[in-house]
Image: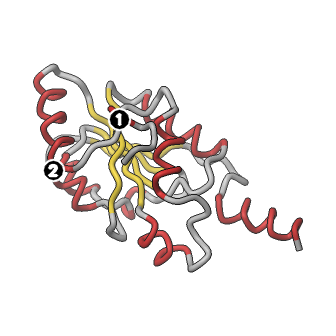
Amino acid sequence: MNTGIGRKHFQLGSLCRARQEWRRRGQKVVFTNGCFDLLHGGHIHLLTYARQQGDILVVAVNEDASIRKLKGADRPIFPLAERLEILAALECVDALISFPDDTPLRLISEIVPDVLVKGGDWKPEEVVGKPEVEAAGGQVVIVPFRPGHSSSRIIARISDLVD
């Protein structure tokens, strides 16, 4: 991918090798995921809060086809390469990986982060990967929710303005 994301974008194998090195150094790895279709203040809050939970923040990003399946045919607004480029520009993001699945369970099971972070719109018992992370001695952290920061809601507001 030639999008300027360079050293932050990983494939699963290289991310697992990096994870082993981070573990060897005693660094705490934090994992979060999402579509990040239209980056907004709620995303920034989630990512900065997540980064504060450890030493390395890994962000998993849904690929375009999985977003269409989850959100509808008119999504994503921005293609994967652009979303990765935007996220890579954020200082709080240390590593990026994309995934084609509906959930990041396969990634979580392979990476086994020390901390799994989700937004406040999730209940802890609903968090995908919670049993796997906790079984390995990790924890799940729910970021306090910021009302009004939903990509779908923002897109609907913009659409109303255009119509």
Disc 2, SS = helix
Q: Which amino acid type is shown beneath numbered disc 1?
A: Lys
Q: Earlier in the sequence, mark 2 or mark 1?
A: 1
Quadrant where the image shows the C terminus: bottom right
Circles 2, 1 touching at the beta carbon (< 8 Å): no
Q: Which amino acid type is shown beneath numbered disc 2?
A: Ala
Query: x, y (%) of residue 64?
Result: 46, 66
Instruction: Compare residues 27 and 69 and report the one nearer the observer.
Output: 69
Residue 133 as seen in the image, left or right of residue 62: left
Instruction: Compare residues 66 and 43 and report the one nearer the observer.
Output: 66
Instruction: Compare residues 21 and 83 and report the one nearer the observer.
Output: 83
Which mark, by number, is residue 135? 2
Depth check, mark 2 against mark 1: the one in front is 1
Q: Which residue corresponds to the image point at 36% horizontal and 43% vertical from the top-left? A: 96
Q: Which residue corresponds to the image point at 24% horizontal and 53% vertical from the top-left? A: 108
Query: x, y (%) of residue 46?
Result: 53, 41
Which mark, by number, is residue 8? 1
Q: Which residue corresponds to the image point at 44% horizontal and 50% vertical from the top-left? A: 118
Which mark, by number, is residue 32? none
Query: x, y (%) of residue 17?
Result: 12, 37
**Residue found at the very far top of the displayed protein:** 25
Q: Which residue corresponds to the image point at 57% horizontal and 79% vertical from the top-left? A: 73
Q: Is residue 62 above or below residue 8?
A: below
